[in-house]
Amino acid sequence: MEEHAAQAAPAHAAVDWTTRWIGVLFAIGSTCFLVGPFPGFVELVGSQIDAAVFFVGSLFFTSAALLQTLHSDGGLDRWACLVQFVGTLFFNVTTFQAFQTGLDANEYDRLVWTPDARGSVCFLVSSVLSCVAVRHLSHRTTDWWIAAINLAGSVAFGISAVASYVVPSTGSAIDLAAANAWTSLGALCFLVGALMLLPARQETA
């Protein structure tokens, strides 16, 4: 028994540290998406720096999602992670394309809004799958809360995507203020969920 415990301990520690890294990476990415939409921040740093904050945040999302996918348990959990990872790739594309200036409404919707909308759909699908997976695989209250908060964040990102659609006839977003507000709210949900990963794993250490 002692030999078995000694062999299991390093593996448990590795999982523990992996989960913490996932939480840290998601937290950094979420912070970028939380701060980026604030009008005062844009005015302070300029539109290009603001776009860079979103792009860097999307890279942290992708890093965390990839790590989470590689260490997922299989089944619904694996599918949730894979769909989430694909969603982060769409966010990489949309935040990179946002660096471009002088786009008309049609170009913006095709190059920036479309991958943003697809990424939001992926996050929503992933969150639903995660909720189902937690229901079947986990009895931990903390896991339920994390899944629910992330689902709320995905819904907020989805609403933001709808509000940010640029109407070709007017050249303006449906509701830019709402898009920014819902982006920040969604990012705040993801930040809370990411931070909850850290003490959640310490409880089982």
Image (cartoon, rainbow, N blue to C red):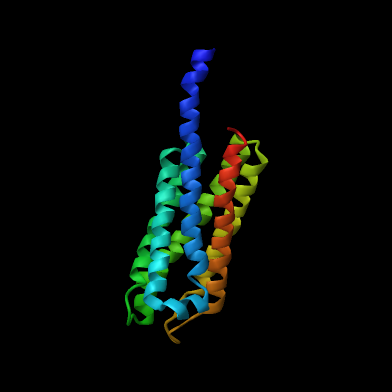
**Quarter of the image where one finds residue 186:** bottom right
Instruction: Using the image, determine if residue 1 lies above or below residue 186.
Output: above
Q: Nearer the viewer, residue 161 or 24?
A: 24
Q: Is residue 155 visible?
A: no
> How many numbered discs, if any?
0
From this view, report whether residue 159 is shown above or below residue 101: above
Using the image as rendered, state which of residue 93 and residue 18 is in the foreground: 18
Which quadrant does the C terminus fall into? top right
Q: Locate residue 29, reporting x and y percent.
A: 46, 58
Q: Position of residue 149 (x, y in %)?
A: 61, 54
- Residue located 57% across and 75% down the image: 178
Identify the residue at horizontal 52%, vertical 19% (top origin). Answer: 5
Residue 124 percent coordinates (x, y):
53, 56
Residue at position x 61%, y 43% in the image: 143
Q: Residue at x 42, y 82 (%)?
A: 168
- Res. 89 visible in picture: yes
- In the current view of this chain or complex, which residue is farthest to the right? 141
Q: Residue 31: image x %, image y %? A: 50, 61
Q: Quadrant of the N terminus?
A: top right
